[in-house]
Image (tube, helix red, strand yellow):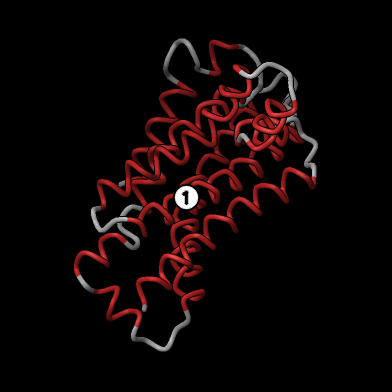
Amino acid sequence: MVMVVFLTAIGLIVWVFPDSNILDYGYADMGSFFRLAPYVLIFLIPAITMRSLAEETRTGTLELLLTKPITNIDLVLGKFFANWSLVLLTLLPTLIYYYSIYQLGNPVGNIDSAAVAGSYVGLLLFSGAVVSMGLFASSLNENQIVAFILGVFFAFIWYVGFGALSQLLGTGTGSQLLLWIALDEQYISLGKGLVDSRNIVYLLSLIAFFLILTLLKVEKLRK
């Protein structure tokens, strides 16, 4: 259902809605897709992850799961990769958009493939970061609705909040630091077509940070 909602919403935005559709835009470019996809994922990914630990805590199945011969790290990573895989499967059909625009270009293939590839790398890592945030949110409360709200809050703060706050602070060191840790800045940098290892390392570190927080919470539940 999440896949259908995402693909329907993005399909309407990219191909139908007059203010954003590619056909009226007149250029072989996937900019509208990559600009709007993160905002859709900020709400859809927490909807995927909200039950991961919260529902198991509420129903008591987490206690049963913790008695199995698996480590806490196995549990957290298993939950993370399961949710992330579902998001990746949701993004996979959007490659049809790239093929369609590639064929519609004049001449055929008149599209910045490097920028598209970089944007997809950024979108995949952005999705992983939001999945880790949603998983951590799910570990904080047994109510899945609360977990959803917290997941959206964490993702929104990291994607929009830090960048907006940096603008309020001017051009000082604190402003530059907030701008650097903002997810939108990292995502935009990757979308330029030059995959910088610093952006990759930061996004992977952010994923690891929230997974460690989730692991600490699971260890606390296990005691």
Where residue 162 appears, as percent x and y from the top left, is 57, 30
From the top left corner, tell me how far across and down residue 193 is, in percent.
77, 34
At x 42% / y 89%, what residue is drawn?
A: 69
Q: Is 38 left, or right, of 103 in this rendering?
A: left
Residue with the mark numbered 1: 133
x, y percentage for residue 174? 69, 29
The residue closer to the viewer here, 209 or 9, is 209
State the residue at coordinates (48%, 67%): 215
**Which residue does the image show at 36% across and 51% down from the upper left?**
48
Does any portion of residue 109 appear in the rendered image?
Answer: no
- The image quadrant of residue 190 is top right
Q: Nearer the viewer, residue 101 or 35?
A: 35
Q: Nearer the viewer, residue 120 or 182?
A: 182
Residue 122 in sight in this render: yes
Q: Quadrant of the C terminus?
A: bottom left
**In the image, residue 110 above or below residue 123:** above
Q: Secondary structure at mark 1?
A: helix
Residue reaching furthest left?
Answer: 59
Up/down of 119 relative to 144, above or below? above
Q: How many marks?
A: 1
Q: Is residue 22 left or right of residue 188?
A: left
Q: Is residue 18 above or below residue 187?
A: above
Kind of residue indicated by mark 1: Met
Q: What residue lies at 65% left-to-right and 29% top-to-bottom? A: 103
The part of the image, by quadrant, that contains residue 12 is top left
Q: Quadrant of residue 23?
A: top right
* Residue 214 point in image, percent of width and height: 46, 62
Q: Residues within 10 Å of mark 1 (few under 14, many from 20)?
A: many
